[in-house]
Amino acid sequence: MNRPEEYAASNGLQYRDVNNLIKEFPEDFREMQGRVIDVGCGPGNITKDLLLPNVGKDAMVIGADLCAAMIEYAKQHYEFKDKLSFIQLDIETPELSNNLIGQFDNAVSFYCLQWCRNTKLTMENFYKLLRSGGKAIVLMVSHYMIFDIYSEQQKDPKFAAYMQDFLKFTPPHHGYPNAEEMLREDLKEVGFEILHCTNRWKTFMYLSLDSLVNFLMSINPFLERMPDDVQKDYRKDLEERIKNEYMSRKSNEDSNNCSIETLISLLIAIFKKP
């Protein structure tokens, strides 16, 4: 994954979908008081710009992310005394720190939980983080074309050595038509009361092939393993696969100056700890 500032500049898709989520469930966000943890906050811009203004006026928001560089960036640019702070956290850890258990009144997570292969363990940790009566709102990717591309690229001898663990970076619901039921089952087993759970397809328009590829490169987990020359080959390969498999022939004629509409499937759930 690229540097936090590059990621923050490229996450227009997340920004739009989180903004739409807040507009769809405004009361659920406004009712969030006390300590609110944002799991997978990344560089912190969405936490500060979208979440903080839309939760209860007396809420204290704590952004949490696995990546130390993201947390350091967020602290430097967005931390605000008594309103917004940041901590490092692995939400998929088998041993959640005791000082976090039962310390939060509400929890949210946007575009993060698709990276957690063990969804039941992840939801168990949400359960532990929350106090009794605490509510959580999550939005995660269930299907996106880049994960199909990973599956094909890892078969290419040029990239195979760097992508053997590609499944680790593929959403656990990807490719499953019953993604909503899979999530519902995990939530029920953990003990949550499910208030809302849907899986929906949405579109997002990129202004050019370059803008789409720049975004996909910014979230790519394999690049840091590749030498510079392989990274250049990888980008060219990614561009060609998108042209050949995800663009119409007409768009392909002038792909760098043509807008591209992409499809993404999102799981949205609201649930409560009894």
Image: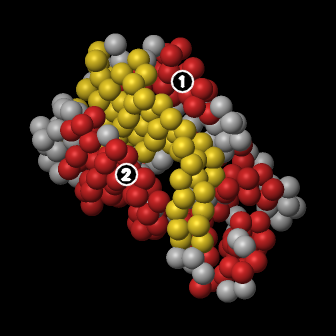
Q: Which of 159 and 200 is in front in this view?
A: 200
Q: Residue at x 39, y 57 (%)?
A: 15
Q: Nearer the viewer, residue 270 or 170?
A: 270
Image quarter of residue 138: top left
Towards the viewer: 160 or 50 = 50
Count the labels in the image.
Answer: 2
| Whether label 2 touches label 1, CB < 8 Å | no
Question: In the displayed structure, would residue 77 be above or below residue 97?
Answer: below
Residue wearing tag 2: 20
Q: Quadrant of residue 171?
A: top right
Q: Mark 1 points at which residue?
A: 184
Any part of residue 251 in sight = yes
Expressed as whole percent of the image width and height from the top left, the position of residue 48 reads 26, 53
- Around disc 1, counting alpha carbons within 10 Å, would you say few (fewer than 14), some (14 to 19), or many (20 or more)? some
Q: Residue 65 carries which label?
A: none
Residue at the spot x=17%, y=44% of the render?
83
Q: Where is residue 183 in the image (x, y as percent from the top left)?
A: 56, 28
Q: Which amino acid does label 1 sit on?
A: Arg
Residue 1 in the image: x percent, y percent? 55, 59
Q: Position of residue 162 (x, y in %)?
A: 75, 56
Residue 28 location, quadrant? top left
The quarter of the rendered structure image containing the C terminus is top left
Task: Report whether 82 appears left or right of 176.
Answer: left
Does label 2 or label 1 sit earlier along the sequence? 2
Q: Separation of disc 2 and disc 1 at Cα?
A: 22 Å
Amino acid beneath label 2: Asn
Q: Report the residue at 50% width, 35% height from top.
A: 198
Name the element at disc 1.
helix
User: Where 30 falls versus 245 (above or below)?
Assistant: above
Decide: few, some or many residues near mark 2? Use Cα within 10 Å; few <14, some 14-19, many ≥20.
few
